Image (cartoon, grey):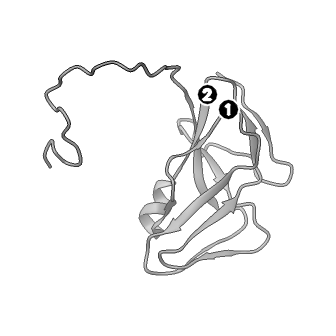
Amino acid sequence: MIAVRASFPHGFAPERASAGAAGFDLRAHIDSPVVLQPRDRGVVPTGVRIELPHGYEAQVRPRSGLAFKYGITVLNAPGTIDSDYRGEISVALINTSAVPYTIERGDRIAQLVVAAVAECEFVSEPLSESERGEGGFGSTGR
């Protein structure tokens, strides 16, 4: 298990909804309700700051129920929190539905997944051939 330092003096602690959950729920840390109009986007603070060990990142991902039931999803999913970032985690949300959606203080708005980062270096060399080649955007079929 890795240790992640966290600070949430006025916010809500990230927490798992179940023992087997990969993500930790992030909650809205707002003083008054935020209404996302249809097709509108907004940034919602969580009141959470973290310090990840070197070699790790945290990904801000949508909550599946919020996305499926209400059309509320993370705009830049997954949002990346680097190990050297110390600011408050805020979530960029978008309302993809045709009706307004109200976010209240304490609502679970996203999930945070901690993942290892591969150490790599890009080397300028010719690429090998592959069966797929340069095909993209649906080139392998439906």
Marks 1 and 2 in Cβ contact (< 8 Å): yes
| Residue hosting label 2 | 56
Category of crowding for the residue at label 2, using alpha-carbon neighbours closer than 10 angstroms: few (below 14), some (14–19), many (at least 20): some
Cα gap from disc 1 to disc 2, whole angstroms: 6 Å
| Outermost right residue | 9
Where is residue 140? Give x, y as percent: 15, 41
| Residue occupying image coordinates x 61% and y 28% | 56
- Looking at the image, is 49 positioned above or below residue 28? above
Q: Is residue 85 left or right of residue 23?
A: right
Q: Is residue 74 above or below residue 99?
A: above
Give the left or right position of residue 33, taking residue 124 as reference.
right
> Which amino acid, by three-letter code, is at mark 1?
Ser
Task: Identify which residue is drawn at 20% across, 36% down.
Answer: 134
Say above or below: 77 vs 28.
above
Residue that numbered label 1 is attached to:
83
Residue 94, position as x, y percentages in the image:
52, 66
Residue 39 against residue 16 in the figure, above or below? below
N-terminal of the two: label 1 or label 2? 2
Dot 1 alpha-carbon crowd within 10 angstroms: few under 14, some 14 to 19, many 20 or more: some
Location of residue 69 in the rendering, given as x and y in whole percent from the top left corner: 44, 67
